[in-house]
Amino acid sequence: MASFRFKALEEVLSRTPKQVDIPSDRISDFFASNVFGKESMREYLSKEAFESVNSAIDKGTNIDRKIADQVASSMKAWASKKGATHYTHWFQPLTGSTAEKHDAFFEPHEGSAIEKFEGTQLVQQEPDASSFPSGGIRNTFEARGYTAWDPSSPAFVIGKMLCIPSVFVSYTGEALDYKTPLLKTLSAVDKAAVDVCQYFDKNVTKVISTLGWEQEYFLIDTAFFNSRPDLMMTGRTVFGHSPAKGQELEDHYFGSIPARVTAFMRDFEIECYKLGVPIKTRHNEVAPNQFECAPVFEEANLAVDHNQLLMDLMEKIAMNHNFRVLLHEKPYARVNGSGKHNNWSLATNTGKNLLSPGKTPKTNLQFLTFFINTIKAVYENSDLLRACIASAGNEHRLGAHEAPPSIMSIFIGSQLTSVLKELEVKVKKGKMSADEKTDLKLNIIGKIPDILLDNTDRNRTSPFAFTGNKFEFRAVGSSANCATAMIVINAIVADQLIKFKGQVDELIEKGIGKDEAILQILRSYIVSSKNILFEGNGYSEEWVKEAAQRGLSNIKSAPVAFDAFVSAKTISLFENLKIYSKVEQYARHDIYLELYTKKIQIESRILGDLAQNHIVPTIIKYQNVLLENLKGLKEVLPPADYKKHSLILLRMVTEISERMAIIISKKEEMVESRKKVNKMIDSREKAVAYSDSVKNYFEEIRYHVDKLELMVDDEMWPLPKYRELLFTR
Ligand code: ADP
Ligand code: MG
């Protein structure tokens, strides 16, 4: 009987690209056609309702019950025209799952939910929240949670479902999702940044945070996916020897995209466009069968929703093309992992990017203010930044030599490095002379736009890089919800800007001129935070040593990284900004630990099962073939010849036995270790033990399995091999 692996291989080789029809040659004909955005709202809503929703979007004002009824009935009319028959509040619980998994929560109200859609249903829903993680909040308080409409992200239709972006909170008001704290941090950074902007431009009344994510992912044929239980259960391969050819030639990066993949991309891009997700670029990534897509940047809340939507759509549409999308951070050992670069900036209502230098020394000083405050914020909160990208999946990726290291550092390029150096030298503590001020303005601050134009030195090894007009946070995991990073960046920058304003105002009160006061405080930040700036190779061993000398943390383990979520500093930071209560922070910490433990536990189980049920029986079969061969040789050969010719076979037979013995005994030890760890009550202690003890067995067992893969008859090997997973198309 042919094994699953060969059936899968046959199936994959017989595939042809699927025909994809484009609704129209002009994307603008169908872009956002399934979104209840400003245009549709203008068409369907009364003037009063339209203005009320807009004011809710721009100013965060409340929408009253009467208006909500109006919006609901218009939304219903619009959605029905698009073929929708049901509605659902679409939200992002802390499981990290996407919209697809929430379908069970729509309530069909006698099969015609959409008929009964009123303001109350639009504004609030009460899903049975008992199976979503709450970190113990619901146990101590009330069993129910509810979802509430977020008017700042437009509703949309997928298939027959009207989806209403919503927040998800417990009955007593604690956030159980990503969106609630995100919205709070966005308004915190808005307020803090507007206040600082007043030094430079009184017309600034609103500052939005912008996010442009880049999503990396792997594609794999469904047939292969289904014949790899590890991929099915965990999203990554726990075994598999490197293929003869890996990614070393980097020929995939510039290669043309295979036809089947192009068809898939086109298909999901069309769906993205209909939902208003402004996907712009697509290309191959470094690893074989790895790809990336990126949109035009948007306001952060919308961008986060769009990324969640994209991940969901990708998975659904890939199935129509017989592909599975791997969003895991490290699906294959010794092959590049996947990240999600979060490009972040701040923009004003006057149309100015605050991380882009302007034409005058004044706007450049504004640029320097936001640029240096961000550096200071990252320096002061680097452990928190490290914590927000930590996960079981990203732990496999970070610190592997081709991924961003787990040391947080910032790359700013050589030109800005010298600008900061000059500011440090030239800004004087006391009063500065007129000449000194002119020199600063003309020769340093005034020249920034010119030097940035040719700022081409990009550093791909930095976890946090300034790239001309934005910071790029590259260490975010590919499966993560972008909100985790956005919450932290916006919160720490808001906190920092508030402190900055306080310090500058204090100097101004003492009679120091505004610009001088700003420069003096910025200079002190340059001095205090320069240890986080690093221009060299972040993947190198030297950097690990140097970072240690500089006193920067290098936290490899995710459960230990999570500690920063509940440090005294973080707790007061989020409390002061009114983003999280202490209870919410401890709850979240607990949820992350539990999620980590569960994921490693599942990996450990599947690894043990595969070793015992797939690998061991296969190698025994092969060993029997060798033994048969030995018997045959013994029958036909004279004893002296037998002795000579049986040597190599005997060596193979014993090597199999030796490796098998290690695999089985290590697997047993791993199970014992798991049993012990599972008895632990404290969730941190347990997660740390999973990371330090249970996970340690993975590499050792894998090593022997992978060696055997090279030895055993290819026809007998049950699991599709790396060369097949990565190169067949
Ligand atoms: P790469 O990093 O691959 O070289 P680009 O420099 O072209 O790519 O841009 C990467 C991402 O940066 C894009 O997704 C884009 O939307 C985003 N981006 C550009 N400007 C901003 C901004 N002001 N705020 C947030 N994101 C931005
Ligand atoms: Mg990038």
Image (tube, helix red, strand yellow):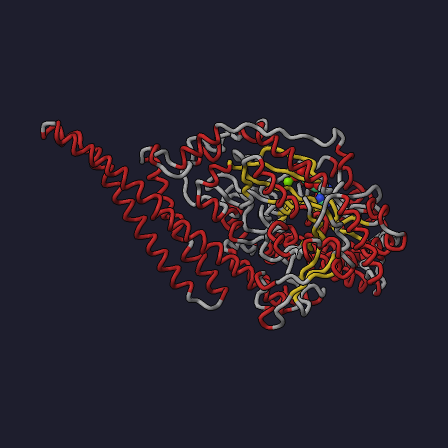
Whole-percent x, y for residue 222 in the image: 50, 38
Instruction: Name above or below for residue 579 compared with residue 247.
Output: below
Q: Is residue 448 left or right of residue 649?
A: right
At x 37%, y 36%, the residue is 3
Q: Observer-nearest residue: 17 or 96?
A: 17
Q: Is residue 542 left or right of residue 87?
A: left
The residue positioned farthest toward the right in the image shown? 47
* Displayed-image quarter of ligand 1: top right
Instruction: Name above or below for residue 663 compared with residue 680.
Output: above
The residue positioned farthest toward the left in the image shown? 639
- Quadrant showing the N terminus: top left
Whole-percent x, y for residue 132 in the image: 58, 60
The residue positioned farthest toward the front in the image shown? 110
Whole-percent x, y for residue 143 in the image: 61, 69
The answer to whether residue 622 of the structure is visible from this angle is yes
Instruction: Name above or below for residue 298 compared with residue 562.
Output: above
Whole-percent x, y for residue 108 in the image: 67, 55
Q: Observer-nearest residue: 356 or 695?
A: 695
At x 54%, y 53%, the residue is 391
Q: Picture quarter containing residue 321?
A: top right
The answer to whether residue 419 of the structure is visible from this angle is no
Q: Is residue 398 left or right of residue 304?
A: left
At x 55%, y 59%, the residue is 592
